[in-house]
Image (cartoon, grey):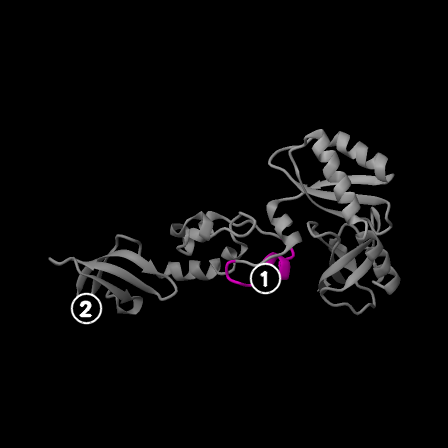
Amino acid sequence: MKVVGVQLYPWDQVYDFDLGKLELARGDHVVVKTNAGVELGTVVYVGKEIDEETVSERPSSVLRKMTQVDEDKIKKYDSKRREVLQACHKFIDEHELQMKLVDAYFSFDGSRIIFTFTAESRVDFRNLVKDLTRKFQKSIRLQQIGSRDEVKNKGGFGMCGRELCCVKFLDEFTSITTDMARVQQMTHRGSERISGVCGRLMCCLAYEEEQYKEWMKKMPELGTLIKTEKGEGKVIDRNLPRQTVRIVLDDKDATQMEVPLDEING
């Protein structure tokens, strides 16, 4: 069975839906049926093959590609976002809640409003939900998201000058660790140089990690004594992309020199 990956909300995971006979492309907006009702989502990938026998539940079908009527309905909801956000901000202040409101979304049928927020710790927003439900007469959902989700929602540019990866093409976030920065010899730059707009380690640290690990396998350890045409020296630094090591020779001047790996003897 061919399926299409659809993301219903910017912070949400990607769900598989039966592609059927539709012709879709990444970025298309589609109407799908979910357990929560009919929703509008964005196509993330198309044409993945799955074995029906290995899935516990057959994926729901994509109902249709977004029509002009659907688009007009979404525009109508969007026109109300400012109003609902202002009301929510007001209630948050009244209840003195330690949370930062990010955005508001309407379900496709208009029966629910989802408010996204960030917070440093757990927030008791039960009274906030009651106030919002009473004001808008709709089902209310409060969704806490992370700082990376917030930045993906707002957009922006990285220190490289390009549009943020999470906005341009990343569909799901992976774990980024300091070990990735260490392998790529970037920890000495300081946390502010390897952190993104969101304040977390940059997602791009994962892109070349495997290549750096391969380069690392060929490198002698720091402190290793190696033989060169100019004598024996101790490895004091390594340049992984260039595949060279810096050594200090065992001579009276403690001469330093850069040596390509293929010039190391034994």
Q: Which quarter of the image is occupied by the C terminus? A: bottom left
Most prominent secondary structure in the magenta stretch?
loop
Q: Position of residue 88 (x, y in %)?
A: 75, 39
User: Residue 95 in the image: x percent, y percent?
Assistant: 71, 29
Viewed as shown, does residue 178 lie left or right of 71?
A: left
Q: Tell me the element at label 1.
A: loop
The mark lying in front, picked from 1 and 2, is 1
The residue under the point 84% across, 54% down is 76
Position of 190 relative to 239 (above/below): above
Q: Residue at x 49, y 56 (%)?
A: 205
Give the residue pinned by disc 1.
163
**Residue type at the position of mark 1:** Glu
Q: Is residue 51 left or right of residue 118?
A: right
Q: Which residue is mark 2?
A: 229
Question: Between residues 197 and 249, which one lies in front from this camera angle?
Answer: 197
Label 1 or label 2, whichever comes before in sequence order: 1
The image's mark for residue 263 is none
Residue at screen point 63% across, 38% down: 119
Query: What kind of element bears circle 2?
Result: loop
Q: Residue at x 47, y 52 (%)?
A: 194
Question: Callout 2: 10 Å neighbours few (<14), some, many (20+)?
Answer: few
- Asked whether residue 165 is drawn in magenta, I would say yes
| Disc 1 from disc 2: Cα separation | 48 Å
Q: Position of residue 145 (x, y in %)?
A: 66, 44
Q: Amino acid at mark 2?
A: Glu
The part of the chain drawn in magenta is 159-172
